[in-house]
Amino acid sequence: MSTRDALTEAMRLPGDSDAMTWLYGHGLAVADEDTMSRAIHDIYCGITADHDEPNEKDRGQARAMIAALQKHAD
């Protein structure tokens, strides 16, 4: 299940709800460790990376980034 699908289900919204489009349109993103590590890999490792998928360093950075976002979102 995608993060988007999980959030839509948790919010008890219909699958075709405009809520996610609204969130994204207002600069918000929904991420878990997997999606955050992929984003970190895309940005910091880029096309010159020596690995195709996020590695443990990317996942560690994702966990740290999510923790920091949670801390400042309250």
Image (cartoon, rainbow, N blue to C red):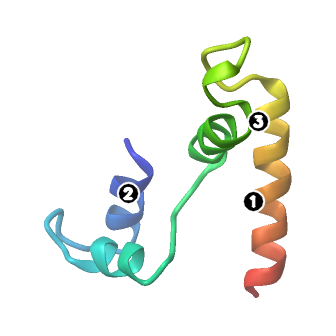
Relative depth, front residue between 52 and 4: 52
Disc sitting over residue 18 in the figure: none
Relative depth, front residue between 7 and 21: 21
Relative depth, front residue between 15 and 55: 55
Residue 72 in picture, x, y percent from top left: 81, 81
> Looking at numbered disc 1 in the image, what kind of residue is underneath it?
Ile
Question: On screen, 46 above or below 13?
Answer: above
> Looking at numbered disc 3 in the image, what kind of residue is underneath it?
Arg
Residue at screen point 76% across, 70% down: 69
Question: On screen, 45 above or below 5?
Answer: above
The quadrant of the rendering that contains the C terminus is bottom right
Residue at screen point 77% across, 34% down: 58
Q: Residue furthest left?
A: 16
Identify the mark nearer the N-term, 1 or 2.
Answer: 2
State which quadrant residue 11 falls in.
bottom left
**Which residue carries the number 2 mark?**
4
Identify the mark nearer the N-term, 2 or 3.
Answer: 2
**Which residue carries the number 3 mark?**
59
Residue at screen point 66% across, 42% down: 43
Marks 1 and 3: CB-CB under 8 Å?
no
The quadrant of the rendering that contains the N terminus is top left
Residue 71 in picture, x, y percent from top left: 84, 76
**Which residue carries the number 1 mark?**
66
SS of the residue under disc 2: helix
